[in-house]
Image: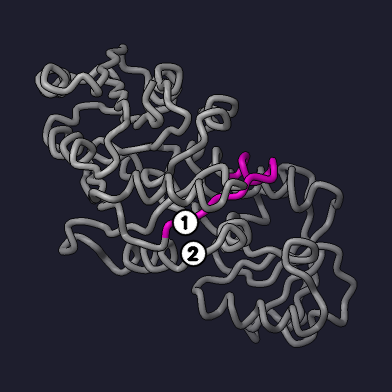
Amino acid sequence: MPQLSVLVAAFDAAASIVPCLESIQSQTFEDWQCVVVDDGSTDHTVKLVQELAEQDPRLVLLQRPHQGVVAARNAGIDACVGSFIAIMDADDIMLPDRLAAQLLAFELQPSLTAVGTRVCYMPRSAVGSGRAEYERWLNSQREPSDIRRERYVEMPVGHPTLMFRAAALKSLRYRDMGWPEDWDLLLRLLDLGAEIGIVPQVLHHWQLAESTLSQHSSSYTIEAFARCRAAFLADGFLRDVDHYALVGYGNTGKRLRKDLRAFGKHCHLISEVHPARIGKVIDGAQVVHHEDLTEHPIDKLLVSVAGTEAREAIRRMLQAVGLTEEDDFVFTA
């Protein structure tokens, strides 16, 4: 039995599936099984995978009617036989040492449930400022504690870079909740106390293409991300309270406040620097300046500010007045 399974869900991936699978075949670690789940492709994806599988029995093709990526990945999970399962997108490239480096990380840190790697978006000519900032943020995560504290901001590790202990992935599986299934999985793992590690090397080339799921799926809209964030905050950090304070009232903060109301969580205090808002009452929430925040009673505090530097400045300010991250406050943007 192979030690490791690689799971690739593919739909109309004829333009990219061959270099994707060849990058798996080029791994320095060779004791793997690769399960390719074809999700009802209408192009030549199946034919191309079959041709490669005839030459390499480690490649296993599973054909299914088109039901979407969640159903495809779950079917693939059932077919994976390794003790570890590495995720791979059908249009991406893994660098030769990726699998070996992740297995070594598990060996060095037996407490880890999953391990990701740093990423590089490709082609570089298609990387705009937003993607570049997200790439920098992803690659700034170094420890399991970093991933845990950043979990509500956005998906803090590239999903197609992840390798899981098979038992954990088979237990949780993917869910279709109308929001990103990868972030949903990660948040559920972290809620169970799992540790997610990072190999501090770029070992995955993340391809930017018009056909990628995040470009078109309704589960990857800004509104879907916001619903996901609110649902996990309500059932996690805010579980034992009905009210919270909010630092920052930009678009993300406004949307989060609205979504949290649906879970019975209400904002009673807003901390802002915008001079036109300070001193006002917005939907029952008093607006105060950041410097006056700690003069008011606070049980739980959500920080919704954009940018790594701004988050770090607020983190230092809150820690200086004795507040503890994860217990008293978390970052949500």
Does the segment drawn in magenta span residue 188? yes
The reply to whether residue 294 is visible in this rendering is: yes
- Give the residue at x 57% y 32%: 168
Does the segment drawn in magenta span residue 122? no
Image spot of residue 307 (x, y percent): 49, 74
Three-letter code for the amino acid on which mark 2 is drawn: Gln
Is the Cβ of the residue at disc 1 closer than 8 Å to that at disc 2?
yes
- Give the residue at x 29% y 41%: 29
Q: Residues within 10 Å of mark 2 (few under 14, many from 20)?
A: many
Q: Identify the residue under disc 1.
A: 198
Furthest residue toward right: 297
Three-letter code for the amino acid on which mark 1 is drawn: Ile
Q: Identify the residue under disc 2.
A: 141
Q: Where 2 sits versus 63, above or below?
A: below
- Looking at the picture, the colour scheme in use is one colour
The quarter of the image holding the N terminus is: top left
Task: In this rendered view, identify the residue nearer to me: 260 or 309.
Answer: 309
Query: Helix or strand or loop: what does disc 1 sit on?
Result: strand
- Give the residue at x 19% y 27%: 12
Label disc, if present, on residue 27 of the rendered structure: none
The quarter of the image holding the C terminus is: bottom right
Image spot of residue 242 (x, y percent): 85, 51
